[in-house]
Image (tube, helix red, strand yellow):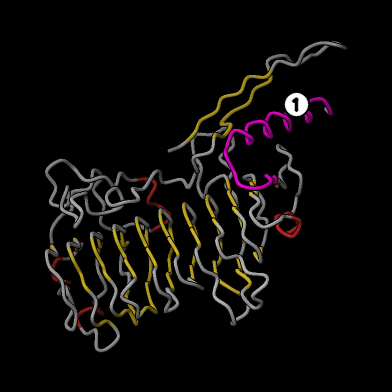
Amino acid sequence: MKALKFYTTTLIVVLFSVFKATGTVITVSNHVLTAGQYTSAQDAIDAASPGDTIYIHGSTTSYGDITLNKRLVIIGAGYDPRNTQYNLKTQLGNVYFNHSNSTTLATGSILKGLHISSDLTYTGTTFDVNNILVERCRMHTLTACGSNWVIKNNKVNHLNLGYKSNLIVANNFIGSSIYSSDKPSVLITNNILIGDVSFSNIKYAHVTNNIWTNPSSGFNNPGTSIVNNTFNKNIFVYADPTSFVTFPPAGNTGIGNVNTIDPQFVSNILNTSIDDVYQYDWHLRSGAIGVGYGTDGTDCGIYGGSYPMPNLTGVCTMPQIVSMDLQNSVIPQGGTLNVELKGRAEK
């Protein structure tokens, strides 16, 4: 058994080394089928130096809460990997950015391929954590706790923009709400908003090329909570056309918005939950109104714009082993262990 464990560990570490990463590469696993340098994600973070990359293996067990207080690249196995031998996702609890001390900021960090069961948020209230990339992650609530964030290709229920500037929210599935923004440098583009997604305290944002299913009736009476935004070339579709909502809402501007029309997804989709989106094909059919209709000449929805959705699993571009089989069950002393590996790299 020791020999088997040795070979499995060696093969996985070699595979990781193919991916170009900054700084030192650190591996984490709390699963019996794989091995890493650490079993605790927080221990790996604490031991890392700014600029290091931490790979966190998929597992049946959550790694719990983590707190980032330095610039790191954190990469997981995906939030919902499929068609692999074990389909193990990288599960975390809450992810905190510590911004209580200017010398321990995670500014410049990258988070990819993580299933965050609770919130991506912050601890402390003094300093902003800027220049963050959150990509291919699943989380309940994401709170932008600094400026210059790119939030793309994720699945998120609640999106708190934190009244920060220079935010790009692109090509995500959003399931419940977007709120707290008052900067004209905020772009909300090419997302699919599932169900009754509400806007609250959103002002001066640019809202373009999104597809909304069953928009919130709250848009009919926005008051002063949703004003001075620009809504351009969004598509709005309703399971019940009598639930029509006027766009842009009163107090906002915009052109080219298309209301009460079938967006013609490849799959017939009107009512679903954000956790079931993998069951459907969200591409637009040939001839659909949203094909090439975006403000940049690409499609509306998650497959247009600058950050087309790469997959619905959160798996990243690094090569991953999808299966491993031992070819000989009995090994004589001094013999050779034959292992067959199959790997795949996602877009």
Percent position (x, y) of residue 181? 37, 78
Q: Which residues are magenta?
A: 2-27
Percent position (x, y) of residue 294? 19, 55
| Three-letter residue code for mark 1 | Tyr
- Give me the residue at 49% from left, 64% from top: 131
Q: Quadrant of the C terminus?
A: top left
**Which SS class for mark 1?**
helix
Figure check: 309 above or below 165:
above
The number of numbered discs placed on residues in the rendered structure image is 1
Residue 237: tell me if it is visible: no
Relative horizontal placement of residue 62, taking residue 275 as reference (left or right): right
Q: Residues within 10 Å of mark 1 (few under 14, many from 20)?
A: few
- Give me the residue at 39% from left, 44% from top: 310
Residue 13: tell me if it is visible: yes
Relative horizontal placement of residue 111, taking residue 240 as reference (left or right): right
The residue nearer to you, when weighing 80 against 289, is 289
Q: Image quarter for residue 95?
A: bottom right
- Give me the residue at 74% from left, 60% from top: 46
The residue nearer to you, when weighing 90 against 136, is 136
Figure check: 163 above or below 342:
below
Relative horizontal placement of residue 4, taking residue 87 as reference (left or right): right
Disc 1 target residue? 7
Percent position (x, y) of residue 284? 21, 46
The residue nearer to you, when weighing 173 against 144, is 144
